Image: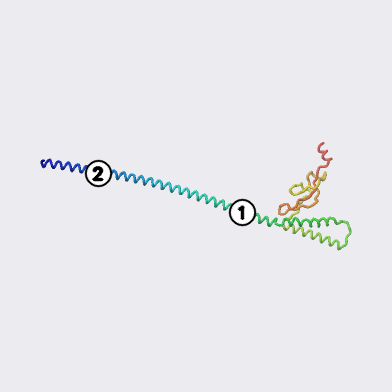
Amino acid sequence: MSKKQENSDNKIENEEMIKSENNDVAEKSEKKDEENNKTEENKDLSFEYKKETEENKLKEITAELEGLRDEKLRLLAEMENLRKRSAKDKNDWIKYGSINLARDILSPSDNLTRALEAIPLKEKRSESINNLIDGLKMVQKEFMMILQKHGVKKIEALNNKFDHNLHQAMLEVESDKHDAGTVVQEIQSGFTMHERLLRPSMVGVSKMTENKKKDKND
């Protein structure tokens, strides 16, 4: 083989080797690019997953905070209602705690009133009896003042329209001078305590007379 031919063969081999090395480098580069692309894709997926997870956690935390806020508001509202109820119960107890005592005390007051009303006005009496009567009247007046001081007031029933919330009808009285349903007689006085009924007034209520009924029908 000539030297020229040998050089030519070596050149071809070198070219093939270079070509082969270039191919290997290119393959490695492609593989590296593929790996890099996969890595980037994995990074993107990981980022998206992480972002989604964080958003879910944020939603959960927000929902939990809203729940706690609502629970706190309900608790505050319940405490405020409890405070108001307690204040009302305390106020009612102060106002009406002695209502039964006040109702029982009215009985001796009624007896004292009946005793004074039963005294004949035109009967001659000694000075000592008159003094006794004046003393009883003073006791009765002071008694009513004490009741008023504690919120007990007499119901003004006479000549007013009958009110079933305040009055208890004991009898009907025919009358041409009053409209039907008017209180014309008070058998026993009624009282309220701080606007609450303590005892109803026992009353006689007017009704239309037979003559007035006939005139009205005619």
Q: Can you say which quadrant of the picture contains the C terminus?
A: top right
Q: Are marks 1 and 2 in contact (CB under 8 Å)?
A: no
| Left or right: 127 as drawn, with respect to 90 | right
In this view, which residue lies farthest toward the front? 1
Q: Would you call the spot at circle 2 few (<14 residues within 10 Å), some (14-19), or many (20 or more)? A: few
Residue at (29, 44) in percent of width and height: 31
Instruction: Say which quarter of the image contains residue 3.
Output: top left
Q: Residue at x 76, y 56 (%)?
A: 104
Going from N to C along the chain, the mark reached first, 1 or 2, is: 2
Residues at marks 1 and 2, CA–CA distance in whole angstroms:
85 Å
In the image, what residue type sits under mark 2?
Asp
> x, y (%) of residue 69?
53, 51
Foreground: disc 1 or disc 2: 2
Q: Is residue 8 left or right of residue 81?
A: left
Residue on which the image places disc 1: 82
Identity of the residue furthest to the bottom in this view: 128
Rendering coords of residue 78 (x, y %): 59, 52
Q: Is residue 1 left or right of residue 164?
A: left
User: Residue lying farthest left?
Assistant: 2
Under mark 1, the amino acid is Leu
- Residue at position x 68%, y 56% from top? 93
Residue 68 in the image: state x and y as whole percent: 52, 51
> What mark, if any, has residue 24 been given in the picture?
2
